[in-house]
Image: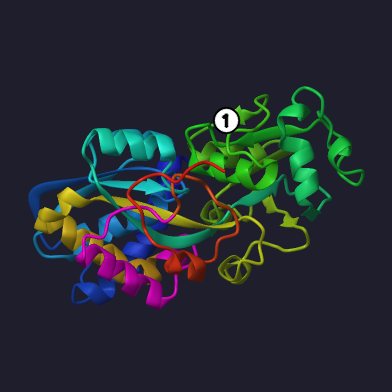
């Protein structure tokens, strides 16, 4: 078994080497850091991208702050962020109504920045004969009514393996859990509970890779890192790829975010890191397995940081199928929108 730390370290090393060779005169040696620290936490999906940005920033920028990146899940990250414990929160879904309220109660204003595109990948053991699954079949497998009822692959798809269905997925603190269930089951909190959950996507990888009857889901970067160990299913006939994710043709495409504490931008090193992340995200994203946004989007979000433009374009509600063009056109609001 390859450890989570080794796997993530290898992914980050690729991105770091690529940027260091052009960002520090060809040298990969640290350029010197300050004693200042910047704390990031949140989504395990966003983690590989944020970690790569943090390490290249620290290693290639003269006098850069030390940036630490945790992965307590999107919900756990927002909990820390809204208590003022972190300056940046990684999120694989928009901030929720309750989280907006928690930040407001702590007088924390935030800047919402989509940073790349992901496609939640539904994976099975390589021996599974299926190559495609429909959204209806996913719902049949994962909806709350399936709990302890849909237990065999043949109940999901008659062409599936004649074996027990073993499910692996993110825990309830995960933004990937929320987004998947919103898209598949129509409610971000609606899922069967008789599956093996983990906030560490590599645990899901290991579960699926070692069990012929398994199905799991996680961010596209983790599929890219483990193509030899698991098989990604097409959904409604569309396979996850950088092209289908970017175009929105893949049904589980979604934006990933960082949220920045607006007050923390008064610290020059925080502002410097955020700008560095935006300047380099288009290069880093594909190196760790994600799809970069258009250059115009990064320019718009850099201006959002410069203007200290706070708020969210989602009103506290998760939305499925929103394109980056539609997202760019939406106004920000500091308060949650009414529930529909």
For the point 52% across and 56% down, the residue is 221
202, 340: nearer the viewer = 340
252, 23: nearer the viewer = 252
Q: Position of residue 120 (x, y in %)?
A: 59, 52
26 relative to 111, above or below: below
306 relative to 314, above or below: below
Q: Which residue is mark 1?
A: 197
The crowding category of the residue bearing disc 1, from other C-alpha atoms within 10 Å (few below 14, some 14 to 19, many at least 20), is some
For the point 14% across and 53% down, the residue is 65
Q: Position of residue 177 (x, y in %)?
A: 56, 39
Q: Position of residue 33 (x, y in %)?
A: 10, 55
Q: Tell me, yes or no, if residue 77 can be seen here.
A: no
168 relative to 6, above or below: above
Magenta-drawn stretch contains 77: no
Q: Is residue 109 left or right of residue 123?
A: left
Q: Is residue 304 left or right of residue 241?
A: left
- Residue that protrudes farthest toward the right in the picture: 158
Q: Is residue 72 left or right of residue 201?
A: left
Magenta-drawn stretch contains 297: yes
220, 231: nearer the viewer = 220
Q: Quadrant of the N terminus?
A: top right
Element marked by disc 1: strand
The span shown in magenta is 285-313
For the point 24% across and 66% down, the residue is 276
Q: Position of residue 14 (x, y in %)?
A: 39, 63
Q: Tell me, yes or no, if residue 17 can be seen here.
A: yes
């Amino acid at each position: 078994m390859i450890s989570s730390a080794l796997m993530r370290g290898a992914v980050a090393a690729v991105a770091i080497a690529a940027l260091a060779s052009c960002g520090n005169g060809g040298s990969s040696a640290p350029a010197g850091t300050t004693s200042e620290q910047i704390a990031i936490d949140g989504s395990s999906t966003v983690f590989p991208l944020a970690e790569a940005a943090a390490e290249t920033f620290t290693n290639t920028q003269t006098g850069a702050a030390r940036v630490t990146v945790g992965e307590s899940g999107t919900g756990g990250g927002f909990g820390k962020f809204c208590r003022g414990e972190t300056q940046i929160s990684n999120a694989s879904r928009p901030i929720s109504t309750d989280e907006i309220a928690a930040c407001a109660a702590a007088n924390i204003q935030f800047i919402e920045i989509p940073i790349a595109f992901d496609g939640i990948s539904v994976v099975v053991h390589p021996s599974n004969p299926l190559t495609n699954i429909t959204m209806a079949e996913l719902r049949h497998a994962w909806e709350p009514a399936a709990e302890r009822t849909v237990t065999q692959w043949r109940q999901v798809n008659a062409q599936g393996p004649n074996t027990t269905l073993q499910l692996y997925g993110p825990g309830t603190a995960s933004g990937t859990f929320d987004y998947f269930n919103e898209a598949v089951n129509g409610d971000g909190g609606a899922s069967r509970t008789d599956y093996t959950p983990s906030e560490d996507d590599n645990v899901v990888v290991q579960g699926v890779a070692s069990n012929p009857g398994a199905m799991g889901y996680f961010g596209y970067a983790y599929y890219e890192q483990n193509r030899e160990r698991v098989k990604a299913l097409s959904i409604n006939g569309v396979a996850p790829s950088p092209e289908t994710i970017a175009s929105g043709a893949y049904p589980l495409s979604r934006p990933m975010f960082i949220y920045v504490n607006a007050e923390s931008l008064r610290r020059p090193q925080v502002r410097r890191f955020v700008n560095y992340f935006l300047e380099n995200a288009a290069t880093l994203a594909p190196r760790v397995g994600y799809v970069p946004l258009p250059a115009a989007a990064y320019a718009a979000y850099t201006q959002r940081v410069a203007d200290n433009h706070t708020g969210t374009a989602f009103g506290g509600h998760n939305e499925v199928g929103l394109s980056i063009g539609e997202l760019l056109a939406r106004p920000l609001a500091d308060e949650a929108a009414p529930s529909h």
